[in-house]
Amino acid sequence: MDDSVGFDPKEFNDLIRRASDLLLDTMDIPRLLRTRLGAEHQVVGSADEMLRSLETFVHELRLYHGPAELHRMNPNEDT
Amino acid sequence: MRMSEADYEYLIHTLSEARFRATEIAVSVRARVGLDHSLAQLGSLAVSKIDGVLGDVRKLAVEQEGGRSRFIGSPERKAALVLPEPNPQSQAAAFSLPSGLGPDHWLHGFLKDLTGQVRASNEITFEGAERLLQQRKAVFLRDAETARRMIRTYPQLFSDGANQPTGT
């Protein structure tokens, strides 16, 4: 699939910021469900999985973009 | 322990919002890294996990209300759209655009983004379509500006005499 429109660092930073905001906004959902329904409830497990999935997504986005962005900010650094 | 009405309202609202936002992000990421990239798959997975929890919470709300939930008619609930699995060949046939619009035209990208969003979230909204169109417009304007700068900086590359093969 070669429909890439190129990597604008600002755009990608914005995507990471939006994904991080989303993670923060959903962070208390598993806790609320656990408090109300008990730790054994199946929905609590699904909510934990949802949060882990979002965390992985944000983490991988940062990993993917990190080296390129670091290089952009410190182009003269060799290490 | 039971959930209160306020809990359900909060959860359904937050999860619906989260699903919409995650879908937008996933579609944007996919447009940049490609459909088969692991990041694109992680984005789709996150959307489906949110969707799963939202469905579970709605089911709980219905059960607690004895089979009829006051949340069913909430604005977030939308009719499911059933779309076939992605198939590049059938997509090309479905979007037979006028011959003047080459494969690089922004309309192709927009339609691809739009169908990708619908597939990821199983729904479509005017707001989502507008946002995708705005993103396409921003990319188009940026590309046009880059092209203008290229022509200004390297006019010799674009003059009539410069008909060198480019390899593309």
Image (cartoon, coloured by chain):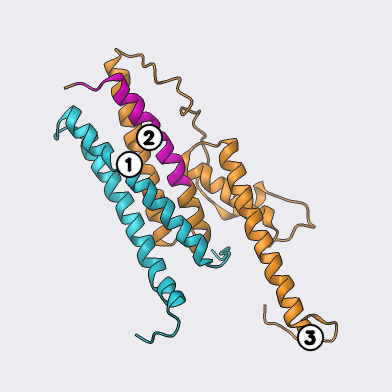
Residue B28 seen: yes
Color of chain A here?
Answer: cyan
Color of chain B here?
Answer: orange
Marks 3 and 2 on same chain = yes
Q: Secondary structure at mark 2?
A: helix
Residue at point 52% right, 67% down?
Answer: A7
Task: Name the amino acid, label 1.
Answer: Thr
Residue B118 placement (x, y as % from top left)? 52, 42
Tell me the CA gap for discs 2 and 1.
7 Å
Q: Is residue A69 magenta?
A: no
Q: Which residue is mark 1?
A: A26
Quarter of the figure with residue B153: bottom right
Residue B54 placement (x, y as % from top left)? 35, 33
- At label 1, counting other C-alpha atoms closer than 10 Å, the crowd grade (few under 14, some 14-19, many 20 or more) is many
Q: Are marks 1 and 3 in contact (CB under 8 Å)?
A: no
Residue B72 placement (x, y as % from top left)? 42, 20
Q: Which residue is mark 2?
A: B14
Quarter of the figure with residue A78: bottom left
Left or right? Give the position of B82 relative to B13.
right
Main SS category, magenta section: helix
State which region is magenta.
Answer: B2-23
